[in-house]
């Protein structure tokens, strides 16, 4: 499966706050938060589903993978989405291990596996 997704009983805002806290424990920070609903409505489009995209990064990990292979920058920063799905809050991300398959480098694959496992732990803690 190309993604990891879980459901929580928390609101979108509660989930994001909890996620930010768990990410900090793993030295990941939210670089940017994109509110797709607000942006589409700002452009005059009818979209009423809460959908946030968080771009997250651990600077030390980014430096490690980019020093190994600059092509990995195409996948950075990591994205985690928090959205409403028919009244249920979901948190998900594309799996770094799946994305990194496009780069034929075992060292990078091992780093991606470690990062993926840590991000999954952060998501699981946030629910």
Image (cartoon, rainbow, N blue to C red):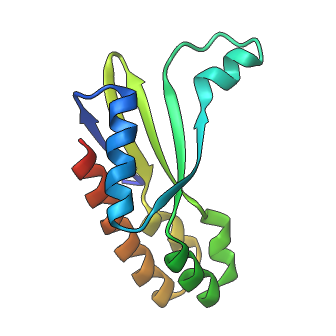
Quarter assignment of residue 22: bottom left
Residue 47 horizontal side relative to residue 86, left or right:
right
Residue 42 in the image: x percent, y percent? 73, 17
Residue 47 in the image: x percent, y percent? 60, 14
Residue 40 makes an appearance in the image: yes
In depth, the one of 116 and 38 nearer the eye is 38
Q: Which residue shows up at 54% across the image and 13% down it?
A: 48
Q: Where's the C terminus, which quadrant?
A: top left
Residue 46 horizontal side relative to residue 124, left or right:
right
Residue 79 in the image: x percent, y percent? 52, 52
Q: Which residue shows up at 44% across the image and 74% down it?
A: 112
Residue 1 in the image: x percent, y percent? 36, 54
Residue 104 makes an appearance in the image: no
Vertical comparison of 35 with 49: above or below: below
Numbered marks: total: 0
Vertical comparison of 35 with 21: above or below: above
Residue 77 horizontal side relative to residue 74, left or right:
left
Q: Which residue shows up at 37% across the image and 40% down it?
A: 17
Q: Which residue shows up at 37% across the image and 58% down it?
A: 23
Vertical comparison of 6 with 48: above or below: below
Determine the residue located farthest toward the right in the rendered image. Answer: 43
């Amino acid at each position: 499966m190309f993604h990891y997704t879980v459901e929580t009983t928390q609101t979108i805002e509660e989930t994001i706050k909890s996620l930010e806290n768990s990410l900090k424990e793993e030295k990941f920070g939210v670089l940017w938060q994109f509110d797709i609903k607000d942006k589409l409505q700002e452009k005059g489009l009818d979209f009423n589903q809460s959908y946030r995209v968080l771009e997250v990064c651990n600077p030390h990990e980014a430096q490690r993978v980019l020093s190994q292979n600059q092509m990995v920058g195409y996948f950075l920063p990591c994205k985690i989405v928090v959205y409403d799905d028919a009244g249920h809050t979901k948190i998900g991300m594309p799996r770094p291990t799946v994305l990194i398959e496009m780069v034929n480098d075992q060292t990078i694959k091992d780093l991606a596996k470690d990062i993926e496992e840590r991000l999954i732990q952060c998501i699981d803690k946030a629910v």
